[in-house]
Image (spheres, grey):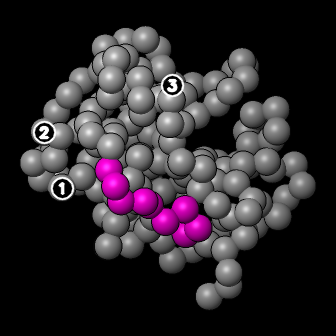
């Protein structure tokens, strides 16, 4: 396997602080606090929640500029900060993380945060597809999304 030419940008620390301490999300709405059934994709640790873990459901925006592609969507995060550090140099795929399933989406965006390309992928094909997207000059970053619900999974940038 080749050395990754990308890095995953962690979910914003100020977002995590705000949802955990103030109980407000990116839309300044109250967050929902839950106990995990197990399998909820926690964006802060890039793994599936374990049954019984305290989690938060909140609206998150991975974009910084106004425009038609700026969107907010639901994300799960652990209710308490974790001491575990997710691996930011590899995609969170495979049975060990339980994060992305058998199929997920890679959407490529320009520096102006406009969508320029996308593909439906599998864990086996994801690395190749991601490299192809990031090789395009017009691509600044890629958002990985869950195929079924279309929710944000993580932001990927060139290393």
C-alpha distance separating marks 3 and 2: 23 Å
Secondary structure state at the residue bearing disc 3:
loop
- Give the image location of residue 4, x and y in percent: 66, 74
Q: Residue at x 26, y 48 (%)?
A: 40
Which residue is disc 2 drawn over?
35
C-alpha distance separating marks 1 and 3: 25 Å
Which residue is disc 1 drawn over?
50
Q: Residue at x 39, y 66 (%)?
A: 102
Which residue is disc 3 drawn over?
72
- Give the image location of residue 105, x and y in percent: 54, 53
Q: Nearer the observer, disc 1 or disc 3?
A: 1
Q: Residue furthest front?
A: 83
Secondary structure state at the residue bearing disc 1:
loop
C-alpha distance separating marks 2 and 1: 9 Å
Work out whether mark 1 precedes mark 3 in sequence or the reverse, and give the earlier one.
1
Q: Nearer the observer, disc 3 or disc 2?
A: 2
């Amino acid at each position: 396997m080749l050395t990754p030419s990308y890095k995953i940008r962690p979910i914003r620390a100020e977002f995590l602080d705000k949802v955990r301490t103030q109980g407000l999300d990116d839309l300044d709405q109250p967050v929902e606090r839950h106990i995990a059934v197990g399998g909820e994709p926690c964006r802060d640790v890039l793994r599936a929640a374990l049954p019984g873990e305290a989690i938060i459901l909140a609206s998150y925006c991975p974009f910084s500029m106004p425009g038609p592609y700026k969107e907010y969507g639901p994300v799960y995060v652990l209710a308490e900060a974790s001491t575990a550090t997710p691996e930011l140099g590899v995609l969170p795929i495979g049975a060990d993380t339980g994060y992305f399933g058998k199929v997920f989406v890679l959407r490529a965006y320009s520096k102006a945060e406009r969508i320029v390309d996308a593909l439906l992928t599998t864990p086996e094909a994801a690395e190749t597809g991601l490299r192809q997207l990031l090789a395009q000059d017009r691509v600044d970053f890629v958002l990985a999304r869950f195929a079924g619900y279309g929710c944000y999974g993580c932001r990927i940038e060139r290393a």
